[in-house]
Image (cartoon, rainbow, N blue to C red):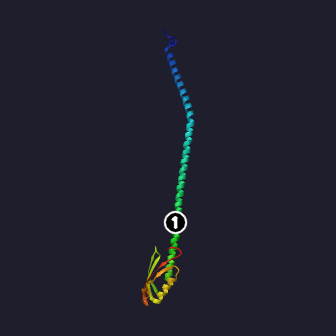
Amino acid sequence: MTSTHSLNLLPPEDKKRIGYQRLIRFFAYMNVRSIILLVIGNTLLLPTYFFLFFQNRGTQELLAAQQRTAQTEQTREIEKRIQQTNTTLNHLETTYTIAQDSLTASITDIIKEAPLGITLTFLSFEKETNHVSLRGHAATRSDLLQFISAMREHPSFHDIESPVENILRNKNISFTFSFTVHSGKNL
């Protein structure tokens, strides 16, 4: 026996139309259900999205701040090195300027101390020891002795060494002697 539910007495066109309507309702129902699921899923995912969005933005700002800090630290280190170099250069400049001025003043003093009968032919200076060697020609022994005594009285000249041969001759003397130059600062 057949059930009344399976028995359909409608014409075939109506059966097709009803089949299409059922199919359309089924797809509409599934679409509505899918849309509802998507809305619920998106609603549940929005807090995670916002959390990750703001966390990413904060991380980028932190990274930018750290890079600025690193650049600032590098800049400070470079500035510190430049200041140290400038300090060293200023120290060297003042030291060597004073040393050159002192050496120049000492050589000028040597020339000034020489009487008219003294002619200097050679001057040598050793920077490490501040040792000066002089060679020259003296017209008379008295001119040479006057020159040596003026050198000994000069406050910057010390350890003056004059060989005995310098004073053996009375006239037309070739002399040589050496001494150390001291000033307020080392040369």
Q: Look at the image and tell me whether residue 81 can be seen.
A: yes
Secondary structure under tag 1 reads: helix
Q: Mark 1 points at which residue?
A: 88
Q: Which of 15 and 76 is in front in this view?
A: 76
For image coordinates 54% across by 26% down, the residue present is 33
Q: Is 145 in front, or is 7?
A: 145
Q: Crowding near pointer 1: few (<14 within 10 Å), some, many (20+)?
A: few
> Residue 187 placed where, x, y %?
49, 74
Task: Tell me where residue 142 appears, x and y as whole percent.
Answer: 47, 89
Give whichever of 61, 102 is nearer the camera: 102
Give the residue displayed 55% in from the left and 49% down from the top: 65
Instruction: Tally the marks.
Output: 1
Q: Would you say residue 116 is visible in this rendering? A: no
Task: Give the vertical position of 179 relative to 6 (above or below).
Answer: below
- Give x and y (percent) for residue 131: 46, 77
Q: Which amino acid does label 1 sit on?
A: Thr
Q: Which residue lies furthest to the top in this view?
A: 1
Relative vertical location of residue 30 with respect to residue 179 in this rendering, above or below: above
Residue 164 in the image, given as x and y percentages of width and height? 43, 86
